[in-house]
Amino acid sequence: MSDINTPFSAVQIYLAKRRWKLNLALLTVLVLTLLGLAAVIVAITLAFELGGSKTPKYAADPQHFMHASIGAEANSGLPYWMWKALPKLFPAEFKGRDDYKAFGFLYETDANGNESDLPVGISKRQVYGVDVVWFNCATCHVGTWRTAAGGPQHITPGMGSNNFNLYAFIQFLLAAGADERLSPDTMIPAMKQAGAHFNPIQEAFLRYAVLPQVREGLVERRSRLGPLLDAQPAWGPGRVDTFNPYKLLLQLPPGSHVPDAELVGTTEFPAIFDQRPREGMQLHWDGNNNSLAERNLSAAIGAGVTAASVDHPAIDRDAAWLMDLKPPASPYHPDPAAVARGQAIYMQGCASCHGWQGANGYVFQGAALGKVDPIAQVGTDPNRLNSYTQGFRDWQVSALFAGTPYHFTHFVKTDGYANLPLDGLWLRAPYLHNGSVPTLADLLAPPAERPKSFLRGSDVIDPVKGGFVAPPCPVGPASTGAAPADGFCFDTAQRGNGAQGHAYGTDLPAAQKADLLAYLLTF
Amino acid sequence: MAFDEIFQPLHFRNLTVKNRIFRSNISGRFDNEDGSLTQTRINWESKFAHGGVGAIISSYVPVLMEGRIIAGYATVHRDDFIPLWAKLGEVIHGLDSKFIMQLSHSGRQMDFPGVHNLARKTLSSTSNKETLHGFLTQAMSKADIDHTIAAFARGAWRAREAGLDGVELHAANGYLFSQFMSSGINDRKDEYGGPLENRARFLLNVIEAIRGAVGRDFHLQVKLSAVDHNNVVPWEKPGNTLEDTVQIAKWAEAAGADAIHVSQGSLFPHPLNPPGDLSLETLTTTYDAMISSGVNGMRNYMLFRYPFLRPIFHWAWFRMKKGKPVEGVNLEEARVIKQAVSIPVLCTGGFQSASFICDALKTGAVDGVSIARSLVANNDLVQQWAAGHDRPPKPCTYCNRCLVSAMKNPMGCYDQSRYPDRETMIEEVMSVYRAHAPMVAPSKAVMST
C-alpha cells in the first residue's frame, strides 16, 4: 500500500525535491547556529572562568593575609556592591554607620587618615564577572590592643579577632536574606547610591540571576543555621563555634539538627603566631589534628571555601608567612626580680605543658607541650570537646577533599584539651579555650572565685591583671552585643561558658602568685 | 442611428458580422470537469447575444485536455461534444449573433490543472517554469507538436461540424502559441526555435493544418499580442516587438488567416491586459485556490496577503502601465498591424465609449473591437450605444475584480460600487444560473461510457 502522503502532483513532487535542498540549507543554518551558540556559551563560560577568578594581589605578606582572597567568595560571599549597600538599607543594624564596625570589623587607615574600602578579613574576587566579597583568614585572626582607653589602637595580625562579633553578623545576614530590602527593586538603587554603575546587561544579570541567587543562598543558610544559633548562647565578640555550623552546612542532610550533646562548641578565636614550632603538635583547642596544612584547610572551610573554589596558593602563602610570625613584644615591664621568681615557679609547674618564655624568645619545649590532657584532668568546660564527635571526624576524613591531594587524614577524636604554647600570652585574653576567664590574675584564682560575668569586647590592656579590661557586668538575658563599644556581658553560667578547671597555680600563696603573674606578663 | 460606424456590418472573407462589436473571450467555470459544456455556458453566451453584440468569441476552448487553462471550462477535444456546441451555436444564431470558437492550448500557462493534469508537467516550447506562478513545464517533442497541430485541426473541424461561424487561434497572452513565438520564452534549438520564422512555425503549421481540415471557406482569425512585454517579472527578457508581430500577422494572412485580433502581453493576466487596477485584497481571498498550481504559489500568496509585502508586487505590476491609456490600450499597435495586412483587424483593450470606438473605426485603426469586461458590467452595452448613450450610466470601472475572482467565484461584475448593495450584486452574478435546463434521467448506456 502506498503511503497516503506520497506526493503525486507535479508541483508537490518538484517541491519535495527542492525541499530536500531547502532542508539541507536549513539544517546547515541550524547546525551553524547551534555551533555559534555553543561557541558563545563556551566563550562566556571561559570568560567567566578566566575573568571570574580575578582577585586583587598584594605584594606584602601582611597585606595578603589581611586582604587577599582564599577562595571563599564563590560559595559564601556577597556581591561587592551589596556589601556596600547594606549599611544604607539597614541603618539600625549598622548603628547608623556607613561601615561594618558595628560588627567589630577593623578598618585600616592610610597616611591621610582615610579608612580602607573593605575591612580587614574581607577579600574581593570576581565570580561570573561579579565582584564578590567574603572572609579570609584575617577575619578571625586579626585583633587589636591599646594600652589605655582612647589610646592608639594596634591592629595585630595573628591575634584572635577580639572585636569581631561573628554571631551577630551571621544573625544579621540570615535575617536580611528574608528582608524585602534585599529585593532587586530596593537593592539595585541602593547599590547605585553606594556608587555602582551597571550597564543594562549587568543590571539584568544582577536582577535576574545574581541577587535572587544570593537571597536564595541566605534563605537556605537561615534554614540550616537559624535553629542552631537560636539554641546556642550568643557567642559574643571574639568567639566562634567552629564545627557545628560546618556540620549543618556541609555534612548533615537538610532539615537536620545538631544533637543536644554536641550543641555548643563556642570558643575563642585563637592566636596563630609562630606556627613552625607547632608542626606535629595537637592543634585546635581539643588537639584533633596535628597537621598544620590540614588544620589550615579545615579553617578555610570554616571561612567558606569549597573544594572547587579554594585558592591553595593564597592559603599556602598565608601559612608560610605565619610560620615565623612573632607576637608583638609584651608592653608590660614587671619587676625583674619578681619575674625571676615567677619563672622559677612556672618552670616547675607549668613549663612541661606550655613551654616557656626565655631571654631570646619563646621556647617551644616541654614533655606535654602540644599534647592533649584528658578532660578529667584539666577539668575545663567540656562542651567544645563534646561538639567534635567521632562520627563527624569519620565524615571529615571520608568526604572532605576526597580524591585530591588535600584529602583529610589527620583528624582524630580526643578526650581532652591540648596544652598550647603561650607565646604572646598577653594578647590571648580572655583565657581558656572558651574565653571564660578574663585575665591572667583571674585564671590563677580558684575557679569558684573567678568572675561569674564580665564585659567582653574591650581591647584596652589591663595593666595589672594581664589580658583586657573586663569589668563585671550584670548577668541577664544573653546579649547579642553587636558593638564592642557597648561590650558584651559574658555569663559563665551559660552553657559552654563555664570558667571551671585548669586550677593549676590557684593554690599558690599570694606572693608566689604575684611573682608567677609577673613572669606571665612577659610572654 | 447614433454611432453609425459601430453598426455597419463587417465582412470577412467567409463571414459577415452585423456590427463591429465582438464579445471578447471571457467565461467562468461554468462547464463540467470532463470538458462538456452546460446550460450555464449557453446562458452566459446568450446574455451577450441578447445585448446585441455582432459576434461572440468563446472563452478559450482547449483542443486537448492537456492544454486546459482552467478546469471547468468547456473543451472541444471530443467528437461527442459536437452536438453540445451545436446547441450553443443554434441558440446564439437564434439571437441574431455569430459564434466564433477560440481554439486554445495553455502550454505552460495552466492556472488550474484539474484532476486530468495535476500529476504531469505542462507541455510548452520550453522546459523553463512559467515565470509568475512557477507552473512546471516540459518542452514539447516534435511528436508532441505534431499531435497538437492535429488536435487544433480536429478542433476546428468540430467547430465547423457544430455549425459555428468560425474559429480563432488564441496566439496571444502567453498561451502555447505565444510560448513558441516569443523570443523571451522560446529557447528551442530545433526548427521551432531561434529566428522569428522558426518561432512562428508552430502557428503557421496549425493554420495550414486547419485549412487542410476545414477548407478555405471557414472563418479563421488569429489573436496576437502586439508586444510581449515579457518582463513583468523584472529579470525576464522583454520578448517580441511590434515589428515581430507585424511580420507574424503577414505570415498568418499568407497562410490563410481571415482576420487578426490584437491584444498585448506574453502572459495572462498582464499589467496591460486586461488594463486597469488589480485588487490584491481580492486576491487574498481567491489566489489561495492557485497556491498548489505552481511552485511560486505560496510566495505570491504571501505577497498578496501581507500588506507590508504588497509594495513589492505592486511595483512589479504597475510599473508597466505608466503613460498607457486603459481604453484602447492596444489601439495604436493594432493600427500599425492593420496597415501591414489586407485582412480585417480587430482589437481588444478597455473599449467602452461609442465615440472612441467610432473614431478608431473611422480612422482606419481597426475594423472592429472586442470587449469583455465592459460587456460583463453592461451586457446590453451595444443597445445602450444604439440608444445614443456614449457610455453607460454605470460603466465598467476596470477594477478587474471579475478577473481576480475567476479562480473561485462565478464570472460576473464584482464591483459593488456599481450596485445598490451587495445582495443585488450577488443576485446579478448568479443570474447566469437562472434558466434551468430540464433535468432528465440518464440512460444506462450514457452512464456506462
Image: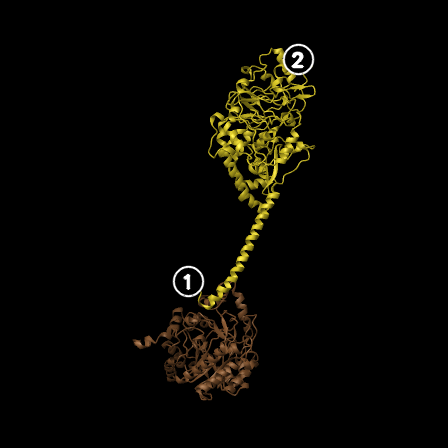
Horizontal and vertical percent for residue B357? 49, 82
Horizontal and vertical percent for residue A98? 60, 34
Q: Is residue B421 above or below residue A405?
A: below
Foreground pick, B142 / B339: B142
Tell me the number on the disc at residue A341.
2
Q: Chain B shown in which color? A: brown
Q: Is residue A304 above or below residue B117?
A: above
Horizontal and vertical percent for residue A179? 51, 36
Foreground pick, A34 / A448: A34
The answer to whether any part of residue A497 appears in the image is yes
Name the quadrant of the C terminus of chain B: bottom left
Choose mark 2 or mark 1, whichever is in front: 1
Tell me the number on the disc at residue A3.
1
- Tell me: A302 left or right of B398: right
Q: Badge 2: how crowded within 10 Å, few (<14), some, or many (20+)?
A: some
The answer to whether any part of residue A109 appears in the image is no
Foreground pick, A95 / B176: B176
CA–CA distance between discs 2 and 1?
111 Å
- Splitting the image into 4 quarters, where does residue B319 fall? bottom right
Which residue type does callout 2 highlight?
Answer: Arg
Q: Chain A shown in which color? A: yellow
Foreground pick, B248 / A235: B248
- Tell me: A269 left or right of A114: left
Residue at image coords 53%, 68%:
B314
Q: Chain of mark 1?
A: A
Name the quadrant of the N terminus of chain B: bottom left
- Tell me: A349 left or right of B364: right
Residue at image coords 54%, 17%:
A377
Tell me the number on the disc at residue B62.
none
